[in-house]
Image: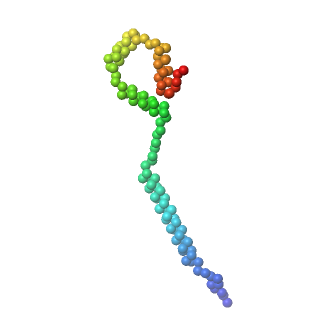
Amino acid sequence: MAINNVGNTNHKPQLESQKLNQQQQAQNQAASAQKAQANAVAAPRQDSVSLTQSAQQMTQVQKKGTDAPVNQEKVDKLKKAIQSGEYRINPEALAQKIAKLEADMFGLSKN
């Protein structure tokens, strides 16, 4: 005499339910991945630049230089003197002026 279906509970609905849950999770993950990719493409990258204080000062000096009026008559006179060899440079005075300019630009005090 054969005994069939002893202790047999029907696991088929439980397995189908697990498979359905797994499929839904996979679909949700795929949808999330698509949304993340769409957001990455849609959102522009935000770049930023920050300048050091020295760079900002140099920018201001350059702007002042381009905005300053030019005395063309004086420029022409100096060009002519340089070309003819009549223009003389005082190296000590030039060095002092360069040192003062750098001290002013970089906030250094000259003792």
Residue 12 appears left or right of 39: right
Q: Tell me where residue 85 sits by quadrant.
A: top left
Residue 16 in percent (x, y) is at: 54, 74
Say above or below: 56 vs 29. above
Q: How is the image coloured?
A: rainbow
Instruction: Please report the residue visible at 54 percent of the width from the left and 71 percent of the height from the top.
Output: 19
Q: Where is residue 80 shown, x and y percent of the image?
A: 35, 13
Q: Residue at x 43, y 51 (%)?
A: 43
Asked whether the viewer can see residue 83, the reply is no
Residue, far bottom: 1
Quarter of the picture holding the N terminus: bottom right
Quadrant housing residue 84: top left
Residue 104 visible to an observer of this rendering: yes
Given the current orientation, which residue lies at the most extreme right position?
A: 1
Residue 22, horizontal then vertical, whole percent: 54, 68
75 left or right, relative to 99: left
User: Residue at the spot x=49%, y=35% of the render?
Assistant: 52
- Residue 37 against residue 74 in the figure, above or below: below
Q: Residue furthest left?
A: 73
- Residue 75 to residue 2: above or below: above
Quarter of the figure with the C terminus: top right
**Residue nearest the observer in this picture, 69 or 16:** 69
User: Where residue 109 sits in the image (x, y, percent)?
Assistant: 52, 24
Task: Return the residue nearer the eye: 98 or 76.
Answer: 98
Q: How many marks?
A: 0
